[in-house]
């Protein structure tokens, strides 16, 4: 990635992650639903899903992720001049999740704050808005805090039930970032489709499952074509050879596999090295060498980033950034100074393909993420407990130590949500 000398280097300075304390094995859920467990573990590539207890919602998950980003990254609340919360599972139609976080985190009053929505894409929309805000000079040296927070819920007993999950990621975006420098070039694709939606009176999303997979892949094609157009003369570059890792929005791990195979095929078609002189040919259509190379590329560039997606489930707006959190924590030394490609997809739909370069000293920022430690501290529940939590929803409660992060939902009175800070640090 080349930066014009006059251009300010902007990117992700710190990353905070938070996961609910409870987790359900998808083998157990498959057994309870009469589904072969391999359909989930192999067919979808998923193993577990995070389950939010009644005292957690998108406010508490987001506040806990943000508190970790600020506290562990030594970022003072008064350094934040822009707070954007990306979610598709907000708690109110008018009052944004961001204003609850503004208070819980003790952010200054001269901080612009609002909520963003475009299904799973809005976390990336927030990152792009924040990066432009910093580059424009409007930030006046301050930093932006972007929080992607969601609880993915589908109907019990539906096929999509296995792709639920919950969690949040907070990203501090600033000049001279300590973790990942963002390349200003990106490619976008938008199109009005009904692949996944959630009418205002429903808590659980509706989805045209198979169609949503096609929409995702079509959006990847569109965003990559726009990205190549922005590369000024190097649009024919092989993206799968350029990047040290490829991170995808991951509703379930097999989706990232399908996406990478598509990117690989298109790459080879652009380069004309697949024997088709640029015409589309599938890696699965009998060209054995191409298919084997695509599998190797997936194993090297994508698979290492999928652990959280496999063990947490779909976290909607946060999903892509869970992949970033995991490779940053697990592979920071090896990735220092190297470029990664990122693909963000939000149903409905809008998608963006962009890139970033890990800083030379990214290992220090990555060490504070604590993803493995969060996974290890979770408690397994059974299907009965999961169904009880799901039926109760986010109604409030009083958690014990370790059952919540920085804050919890104490209750709802007169239609007002009452949050409390915990006395322990997350
Ligand atoms: P389904 O009907 O349960 O599953 O729906 P299926 O019949 O399509 O099977 C799934 C895979 O398992 C297939 O593999 C089967 O062959 C395989 P594939 O052909 O795709 O490679 N399979 C088996 N494998 C091993 N052993 C077996 C076995 N049986 C079958 N015994 C679906 C799956 C994903 C559609 C469903 O779970 C769903 O609707 N999920 C929610 C929608 C979703 O996640 N869409 C993803 C793209 S859209 C997106 O990412 C946006 C989103 O995050 C929302 C947002 O933006 O806000 C969802």
Image (cartoon, helix red, strand yellow):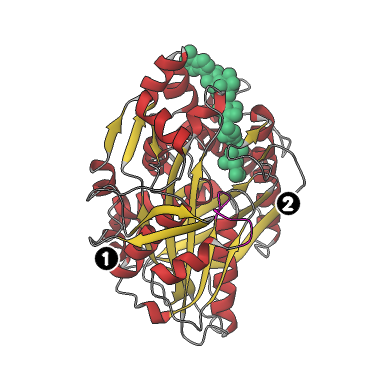
- Front-most of residues 320 and 204: 204
Q: Residue at x 54, y 34 (%)?
A: 255
Foreground label between 1 and 2: 2
Q: Quadrant of ligand 1?
A: top right
Outermost residue, front side: 414
- Front-most of residues 171 and 424: 424
Image coordinates for residue 19, horizontal then vertical, percent: 36, 47
User: Residue 188 sits in which quadrant?
Assistant: bottom right
| Magenta extent | 87-94
Q: Which residue is mark 2?
A: 190
Q: Is label 1 in contact with label 2 (beta carbons under 8 Å)?
A: no
Based on the picture, tell me whether residue 92 belongs to the magenta stretch: yes
Q: Secondary structure at mark 1?
A: helix
By secondary structure, the bulk of the magenta-drawn segment is best described as loop
Based on the picture, tell me whether residue 47 belongs to the magenta stretch: no
- Residue 164 sits above or below residue 79 on the image: above
Q: Answer with left or right where residue 420 lies relative to residue 243.
A: left
Q: Which residue is mark 1?
A: 364
């Amino acid at each position: 990635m080349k930066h014009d000398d006059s251009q300010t280097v902007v990117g992700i300075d710190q990353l905070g992650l938070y996961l609910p304390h409870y987790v359900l094995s998808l083998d157990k859920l498959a057994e309870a639903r009469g589904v072969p467990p391999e359909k989930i573990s192999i067919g979808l590539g998923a193993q577990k899903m995070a389950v939010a207890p009644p005292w957690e919602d998108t406010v508490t998950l987001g506040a806990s992720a943000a508190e970790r980003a600020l506290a562990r990254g030594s970022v003072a609340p008064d350094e934040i001049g822009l707070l954007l919360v990306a979610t598709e599972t907000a708690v109110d139609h008018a009052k944004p999740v961001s204003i609850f976080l503004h208070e819980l985190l003790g952010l200054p009053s001269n901080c612009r704050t609002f909520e963003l929505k475009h299904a799973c894409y809005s976390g990336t929309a927030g990152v792009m808005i924040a990066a432009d805000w910093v580059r424009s000079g409007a930030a006046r040296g301050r930093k932006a805090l972007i929080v992607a927070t969601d609880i993915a819920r589908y109907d019990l007993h539906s096929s999509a039930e296995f792709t639920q999950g919950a969690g949040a990621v907070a990203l501090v975006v600033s000049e001279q970032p300590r973790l990942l420098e963002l390349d200003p070039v990106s490619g976008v694709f938008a199109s009005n489709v009904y692949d996944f939606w959630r009418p205002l009176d429903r808590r659980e999303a509706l989805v045209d499952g198979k169609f949503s997979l096609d929409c995702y892949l079509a959006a990847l094609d569109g965003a990559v074509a726009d990205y190549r157009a922005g590369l000024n003369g190097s649009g024919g570059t092989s993206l799968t050879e350029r990047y040290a890792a490829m991170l995808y929005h991951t509703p379930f791990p097999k989706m990232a596999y399908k996406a990478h195979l598509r990117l690989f095929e298109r790459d080879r078609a652009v380069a004309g090295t697949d024997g088709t002189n640029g015409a589309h040919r599938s890696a699965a259509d009998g060209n054995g060498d191409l298919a084997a190379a695509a599998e190797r590329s997936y194993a090297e560039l994508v698979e290492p980033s999928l652990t959280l997606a496999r063990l947490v489930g779909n976290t909607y707006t946060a999903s892509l950034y869970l992949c970033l959190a995991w490779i940053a924590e697990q592979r920071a030394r090896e990735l220092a100074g190297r470029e990664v490609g990122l693909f963000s997809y939000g149903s409905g739909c809008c998608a963006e393909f962009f890139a970033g370069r890990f800083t030379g000293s990214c290992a220090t920022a990555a060490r504070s993420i604590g993803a493995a430690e969060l996974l290890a501290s979770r408690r397994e529940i059974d299907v009965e407990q999961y169904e009880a939590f799901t039926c109760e929803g986010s109604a409030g409660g009083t958690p014990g130590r370790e059952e919540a992060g920085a804050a919890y939902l104490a209750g709802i009175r007169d239609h007002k949500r009452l949050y409390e800070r915990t006395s322990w640090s997350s």
